[in-house]
Image: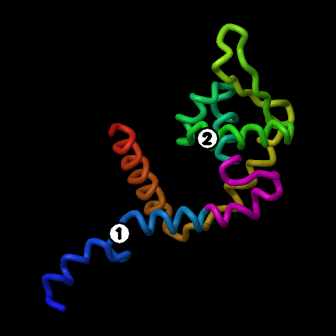
Amino acid sequence: MSGTMYNQYDCIRLDNQICFPLYACAKEVVRQYRKPLEKLGLTYTQYVVMMAFWEYGGMTEGELGRKVHLDSGTLAPLLKRLETQGLLNRERPHDNERKLFISLTEQGEALKDKAVSVPQAMRGCINLPENELLQLKYLLDKALGQMEKE
């Protein structure tokens, strides 16, 4: 094989990708969340949704989707499960039946107190010095912001 052909295919080597370590790291972090989230009865995606409600309060499904970067096809069954668990209410306003307003129940709001233990359990999940973790978060936020503009 000539040197030119090797260079031509360098662009599709896993070691040369940015997306692959992002994907693999995200997958591993989500896997490590399983144990602490079992105590809350939540999956990682449900936890993300609940954090949005704890921070922002009630909102429409569309607003929630924009905040947590999930589409309606993913959110709808997830919200139904959380409603079945007694953590949230889903209501259609009388003046606009196409919108779906979601709010936490008392049980959903109370789960916030238990959820405080999750970040503590996850400390050290990514074993980097604090300044590098902050830099990583900054760069990921910046990259996501740029992608959202496109």
Estimate the x, y position of residue 96 in percent, counting from the top left: 65, 12
Q: How is the image coloured?
A: rainbow
- Kindly identify the amino acid type of the residue bearing the numbered disc 2: Gly
Residue 65 highlighted magenta (yes or no):
no
Estimate the x, y position of residue 8 in percent, counting from the top left: 19, 76
Q: Is residue 85 above or below residue 34?
A: above
Task: Sort mark 1 into few (<14), some (14-19) or many (20+) by Cα contacts within 10 Å.
Answer: few
Q: Residue at x 75, y 22 (%)?
A: 91
- Marks 2 and 1, how far apart at CA: 29 Å
Q: Is residue 116 above or below residue 132?
A: above
Residue 35 highlighted magenta (yes or no):
yes
Q: Residue at x 67, y 55 (%)?
A: 119
Tally the numbered discs. 2
Which residue was labeled with disc 2?
Answer: 73
Instruction: Determine the secondary structure under disc 1.
Output: loop
Whichever of callouts 2 and 1 sits on the residue coming sooner in the sequence is 1
Estimate the x, y position of residue 108 in percent, counting from the top left: 81, 37
Q: Nearer the viewer, residue 116 or 74?
A: 74
Horizontal placement of 35 versus 62: left or right?
right
Magenta residues, start to end = 30-46
Comparing labels 2 and 1, the label whose residue is closer to the camera: 2
Q: Quadrant of the C terminus?
A: top left
Q: Main secondary structure of the magenta part?
A: helix
- Kindly identify the amino acid type of the residue bearing the numbered disc 1: Gln
Q: Nearer the viewer, residue 130 or 107?
A: 107
Q: Residue furthest bottom?
A: 1
Labelled disc at residue 17: 1
Q: Nearer the viewer, residue 89 or 104?
A: 89
Q: Is residue 35 above or below residue 149?
A: below
**Quadrant of residue 79 within the rendered picture:** top right
